[in-house]
């Protein structure tokens, strides 16, 4: 069921009132969930490779990176099932609550020593994320009418919630894990998930209206407002098994095309939690103002930049839309890939500095994270927004799951790519990433006019206040 169809307010009324309050509830809920996820992620490879007498498993670097890649990949596979179940049976709100509860259990299981508890915890986290992730993102799109120019900006604001949690998590969970013990860090991630769940349960009825409630009865689904799907009027009924319209088929093709290029971005970007974490831990001079900066704190650099730059990008897209100069969605994604590629050019500089046994300066890694962040702001919130606009009404959460499925492939590849660093060397690996991501970005920008035409964008509604 399309969450966009639940918004009954006229477009002009919504535009004058700015962003709905429900956006900030979803922002807060996602912030706490991401705090738990990234807090656990910051510790994961360090925990697996850590010395046994300090509570770690003392697994090899290659083994740890492969497990890390498999885990983060499966986190993005289960949203396909979670989106389908929400569309057909649960509704998005119930799916978010179920997913949050399962993830909370998973984080607390991570605080239990032993391999059995470890793999059970990963299972709960993978399944829980499948219910949570696609449905909370779909509800953001459901707050806005079709063609609303604020939608990309809204997803950028929502994305700031993701990254505010990601910024805080290494500072809290990472510090506890590295100083008091791994399981203190993992347990604090469970507390964060619990706070997000309580916040959502307390305020969702008041702030979200009808967005994300139980799906329509099986056999019939209302289409979205004019401008979505095949442009039929609101209230018309279409069966679940009805054939896709020409516009819907084109838009589905666009989602799959963008998802393909999304793989290139995240396969490179997700080196941050694996290879770049281990590289920072062993080959970067972390001394600053008389102290050694904990390795996990570097996981806060990217979300810190997003929190600082996110409002600027949110305003930028609206301002460019008003001036009729906003880049198309495919062009934004292509620019994001080029910026990511340049970030890895800086990692080549770090690798050159360490090739004779020295340590790299911190500014190489921080600079790389800066360009990765700017690229991410051009790609990830814009991609989420595009799926919410393009997905047929009756497949809204399912298609969000398809979008996240591309991250499943990307994260698996990220772990596999990182595991080759010992065999190829970091310089060769970073150089390969530079070339591949730059080529993918250039191709996407070249194809952007064709892809944009297939989007069949509805008339743009630009906010007046």
Image (cartoon, rainbow, N blue to C red):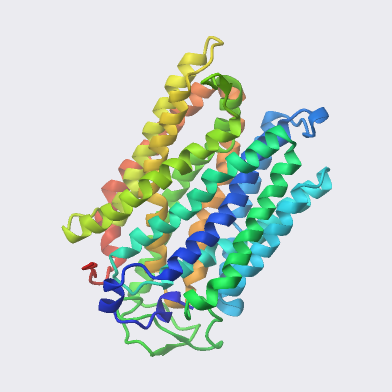
Is 53 placed left or right of 327 in the picture?
right
**Can residue 451 be seen by looking at this rendering?**
yes
> Residue at horizontal 28%, vertical 60%?
452
Q: Nearer the viewer, residue 147 or 316?
A: 316
> Residue at horizontal 38%, vertical 90%?
236
Residue 70 in picture, x, y percent from top left? 65, 46
In this picture, is 355 found above or below 295? above
> Residue at horizontal 52%, vertical 44%?
167
Residue 15 in picture, x, y percent from top left? 28, 72
In this picture, is 206 found above or below 169? below
Q: Quadrant of the C terminus?
A: bottom left
Q: Quadrant of residue 98?
A: bottom right
Is 190 placed left or right of 298 in the picture?
right
State the residue lying farthest toward the left.
Answer: 323
Q: Nearer the viewer, residue 447 or 184?
A: 184
Is 62 placed left or right of 372 in the picture?
right
Residue 274 in picture, x, y percent from top left? 59, 36
Q: Nearer the viewer, residue 57 or 237?
A: 57
**Can residue 257 be seen by looking at this rendering?**
no
State the residue lying farthest toward the top.
Answer: 356
In this picture, is 373 found above or below 179? below
Is 212 placed left or right of 65 in the picture?
left
Q: Quadrant of residue 198?
A: bottom right
Residue 418 in picture, x, y percent from top left? 58, 33
């Amino acid at each position: 069921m399309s969450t966009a169809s639940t918004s009954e307010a006229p477009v002009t009324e919504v535009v004058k009132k700015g962003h709905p309050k429900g956006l900030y509830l979803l922002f807060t809920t996602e912030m706490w969930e991401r705090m738990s996820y990234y807090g656990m992620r910051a510790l994961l490879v360090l925990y697996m490779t850590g010395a046994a007498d300090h509570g770690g498993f003392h697994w090899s670097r290659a083994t740890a990176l492969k497990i890390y890649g498999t885990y983060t990949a499966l986190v993005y596979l289960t949203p396909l099932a979670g989106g389908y179940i929400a569309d057909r049976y649960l509704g998005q709100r119930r799916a978010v609550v179920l997913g949050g509860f399962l993830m909370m259990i998973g984080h607390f299981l991570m605080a239990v020593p032993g391999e059995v508890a470890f793999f059970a915890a990963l299972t709960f986290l993978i399944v829980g994320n499948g219910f949570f992730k696609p449905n909370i993102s779909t509800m953001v799109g459901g707050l806005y009418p079709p063609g609303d120019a604020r939608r990309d900006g809204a997803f950028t604001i929502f994305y700031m919630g993701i990254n505010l949690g990601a910024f805080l998590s290494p500072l809290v969970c990472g510090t506890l894990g590295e100083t008091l013990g791994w399981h203190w860090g993992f347990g604090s991630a469970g507390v964060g998930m619990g706070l997000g769940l309580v916040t959502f349960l307390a305020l969702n009825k008041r702030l979200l209206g009808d967005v994300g409630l139980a799906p329509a009865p099986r056999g019939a689904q209302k289409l979205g407002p004019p401008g979505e799907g095949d442009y039929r009027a609101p209230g018309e009924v279409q069966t679940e098994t009805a054939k896709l319209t020409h516009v819907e088929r084109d838009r589905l093709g666009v989602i799959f095309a963008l998802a393909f290029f999304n793989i290139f971005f995240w396969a490179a970007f997700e080196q941050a939690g694996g290879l770049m974490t281990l590289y920072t831990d062993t080959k970067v001079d972390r001394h600053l103002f008389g102290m050694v900066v904990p390795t996990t704190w570097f996981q806060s650099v990217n979300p810190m930049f997003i929190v600082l730059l996110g409002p600027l990008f949110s305003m930028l897209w609206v301002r460019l839309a008003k001036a009729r100069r906003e880049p198309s969605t495919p062009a934004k994604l292509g620019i994001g890939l080029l910026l990511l590629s340049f970030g890895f050019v800086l990692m080549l500089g770090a690798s050159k500095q360490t090739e004779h046994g020295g340590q790299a300066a911190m500014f190489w890694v921080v600079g790389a994270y800066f360009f990765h962040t700017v690229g991410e702001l051009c790609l990830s919130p814009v991609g989420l927004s595009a799926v919410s606009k393009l997905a047929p009404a009756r497949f809204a959460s399912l298609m969000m799951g398809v979008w996240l499925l591309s991250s499943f492939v990307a994260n698996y590849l990220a772990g596999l790519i990182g595991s080759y660093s010992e065999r190829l060397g970091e310089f060769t690996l970073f150089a390969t990433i530079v070339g591949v991501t730059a080529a993918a970005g250039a191709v996407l920008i070249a194809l952007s006019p064709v892809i944009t035409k297939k989007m069949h964008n509805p008339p743009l509604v630009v906010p007046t206040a």
